[in-house]
Image (spheres, rainbow, N blue to C red):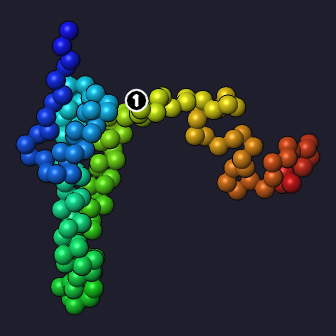
Amino acid sequence: MSTPKTPAPPAHLGKDGARFWRETVQEWGIEDHLLPTLASAAACLDRIATARNRIKRDGLLMTGSRGALVAHPAVQVERQQATTHAALVKSLDLKDNPAQGPRPRYSETGRPAGRPPATTPRRGSKSLKPRKSGDRDGA
């Protein structure tokens, strides 16, 4: 029985995108139908690197058309690409790193992992004490 061939990164990817592609495919063994999503996520990393290089070269602030200092346009590109990259990686569902084993679905208390304990007060709550009958403010 032969081992499945690891797909090579698409030719359009730059250094950062190709590295992300290779590491992700090796660690998680991405299914074929998710490869276009992985390619898009990897391309986002290349665009982020390009934007950062442009900001590094030109500076974070530029003089706008009216003479005022404004943020470099690449700042917005970097932010948008980081958001897109995060959404694409989330859609790949890469939650469980094979090297670390699966993440617990439930904590020791039986609540879903990552949720606050049941005794955490809600926003705007004045107290954790149960309300007494006839007590209006809950304090």
Between 30 and 34, the residue placed more toward the observer is: 30
What is the tally of numbered marks visible in this picture? 1
Residue at 67% from the left image edge and 54% from the top image edge: 123
Question: Height in image: 74 above or below 123?
Answer: below
Identify the element where label 1 is drawn.
loop
Q: Position of residue 135 (x, y in %)?
A: 90, 49
Residue at 17% from the left image edge and 85% from the top image edge: 65
Q: Residue furthest bottom?
A: 67
Residue 34 visible in the displayed image: yes
Residue 73 visible in the displayed image: no
Between 90 and 5, the residue placed more toward the observer is: 5
Query: What is the quadrant of residue 38 in the picture?
Result: top left
- Quadrant including the N terminus: top left
- Which residue corresponds to mark 1? 98
Query: What is the quadrant of residue 37 in the picture?
Result: top left
Q: Residue furthest left?
A: 11
Q: Position of residue 15 (x, y in %)?
A: 16, 51
Question: Height in image: 69 above or below 87?
Answer: below
118 relative position to 30: left or right: right
Question: Height in image: 80 above or below 129?
Answer: below
Residue at 72% from the left image edge and 47% from the top image edge: 120
Near mark 1 (Cα within 10 A), the count class, few <14, some 14-19 or many ≥20, is few
Kind of residue indicated by mark 1: Pro
- Quadrant including the C terminus: bottom right
Query: What is the quadrant of residue 5 in the picture?
Result: top left
Question: Height in image: 106 above or below 15?
Answer: above
110 relative position to 66: left or right: right
Residue at 23% from the left image edge and 73% from the top image edge: 56
Q: Position of residue 119 (x, y in %)?
A: 75, 43
